[in-house]
Image (cartoon, coloured by chain):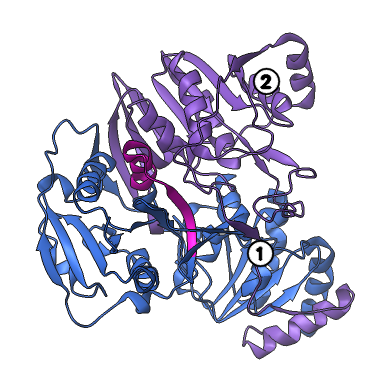
Amino acid sequence: MANIVAIVKMVPDLVEELEINDEGTGLDRDWLRLIINEFDNHAIEQAILLKEREGGEVTVIAPETEGVEDMLFTTAAKGADRMIKLAGDFEEGVNNHALAHAFAETAKNHQPDLILTGVQANDDLDGPVGPLVAEYLGMPYIGYISGVTLEEGRAIVRKEYPGGLIGEMEVTLPAVLGIQAGEEPPRYVAISKVRQMMKTAEIAEAEISELDFSGGISAKRMYLPEAAERAEMIEGDEEEIAAKLISIFKEAGAL
Amino acid sequence: MNEDIYVLIEHLQGEVAEISYIMLAAARDLAQRTSGEVIGVLLGHDAQDLTSTLAADHIIYADHAALAEFTADAYQKTVASLIQENEPSAFLFGNTSIGADVASVLSARLSLPLVSSCVQISNGKLISQICGGKIMAESDLAETTTLVTIIPGGYKAEEGQSEKSPEIKSFNAPALDDLRVTLKKYVEPEAGDVNISKEAILVSIGRGIQTEDNIELAEELAEFLGATVCASRPIVDQGWLPISRMVGKSGQSVKPKLYLALGISGAPEHVEGMAESEMIIAVNMDPNAPIFDIATYGVEFDFFDLIDPLLEQLEEIE
């Protein structure tokens, strides 16, 4: 039996065009489409896999931003037992230090054996959130994890290194793990099941008294990258492009 | 606080990791601004020999049995004690499986600011690359020791290498008992059917391929080109290709003659494994995909609209 908490956040959907705000200091959030951080999605999958294997409960905690309720109902449909929304001023985007304080404060109340979160998120600018939460709670942290086995009072984890090397590590519980990939790809749930959860499941709210931004940084300036050199773009309809590609393949000795 | 820039030298199984040299090069840029020295910090056990190629003004070396291989706890304690004693201007870590586990925890433990995913130093400013390489963020060094995690892309490893061995000064690691994290063993990657780092032509697929069935199309194309199919992380995480075919961070670094990137956006984690390819052809629907910034040729097109005419024309000339 394990009490597992997954801490997750919504991040900019990189498929959409990103714009900078008028001050030039952050993303223009007015038109920003948010999706769950893909690594957090793996953390949720790993949490549910552990619950299915070892028994226990999974609690998912996320800050209140647009789309968070749909995301939390989806995790309920996947098998999460409790969903908690952090109520606070998160909509404008907060640094991970502030977010980690809020996560730590709420996660602590659930006396977790294990806290799982994505190893990183695409909008991290002051480090990933997992190690900060670990330190605020006095727990050990290991990141880049792609496999977890629970034993009495400890976990055996697979930590990824470059080139496919794995370090098998032992960590005492409670601990925070930064998940790179779950042991299985994030499961798919039918939209009908999510709709059903919207009717039957409840999302609890945790009030965050005050956001503590200390320790985090805020960028002096944000901008879109100015490439020194850009690719030579091949134009035309699909037949013309295919023909040009073939002549490039020939030049490169691939044909 | 002093003006020096410290770099945590990363090593695994007796080899210095490439990111260490990249960080030394970045540190040199910063040190010129602060008028300080570049100091490599090596934690290990009987590891002095690892310092000979490091382009640092000197090395601070902590030797301890518990530091022989990386574990987060032992590294965090040792680096924390070094920062408190010496208060460097900045401390650089790799945004890697080693560095990221240390830097963030110490930011919380020592209440020091942390700037992550820094790719370049420009006029003393830290330039970070976020949102999959689509946004750049500029930050300043703080008044206290600034912790920085570095990603590859801005510096070449050679810039951080040197022929002359730097002087080594030893540092006593703090008490390293009651460690909560221990390394049990390394598990070597299973050899795949092919070693993609040795292939001359690679057809690489990313999220844009959408479904597993479409891998077949990439394989057909690869067959015409005498190429091997490889992929970015999301494809491997879906279980569509084995991890031996993954290019990028935690995967393989490749330098083929031709790298055909299909539906790959070009996030820094992928680019660090393939940027050195001789020729890169990128096909992506998103005109802002960062892959076009490093590609030789680009096609702003849906892969699915292009693949059929391409395969047909290849069929004809065969």
Secondary structure, mark 2, is: helix
Q: Please state the horizontal and vertical placement of residue A109, each as a whole percent of the image.
A: 46, 13
Q: Please state the horizontal and vertical placement of residue A78, each as a whole percent of the image.
A: 63, 23
Is residue B106 covered in magenta?
yes
Residue that carries the numbered disc 1 in the rendered image: B219
Residue that carries the numbered disc 2 in the rendered image: A77
B107 up-or-down from A240: above or below:
above
Residue B56 visible: yes
A252 up-or-down from B101: above or below:
below
Depth check: give the residue in front, B101 or A246: B101
The chain whose colour is purple is A
Q: Is residue B177 left or right of residue A198?
A: left
Secondary structure, mark 1, is: helix
The chain whose colour is blue is B
Q: How many marks?
A: 2
Amino acid type of disc 1? Glu
Q: Please state the horizontal and vertical placement of residue A200, each as a whole percent of the image.
A: 73, 9
Q: Please state the horizontal and vertical placement of residue A42, each as a whole percent of the image.
A: 55, 36
Is residue B290 covered in magenta?
no
Where is residue B39, by image quadrant?
Answer: bottom left
Residue A49 visible: no
Where is residue B28, by image quadrant?
Answer: bottom left
Amino acid type of disc 2? Ala
Of all residues, the one furthest to the right in this rendering is A237
Q: CA distance from mark 1 to mark 2?
A: 36 Å
Which contiguous range is marked in magenta? B101-119
Which residue is drawn at the image coordinates 84% and 64% (left, top)? B305
Of all residues, the one furthest to the bottom in this rendering is A251
Which residue is drawn at the image coordinates 13% and 34% (left, top)? B177
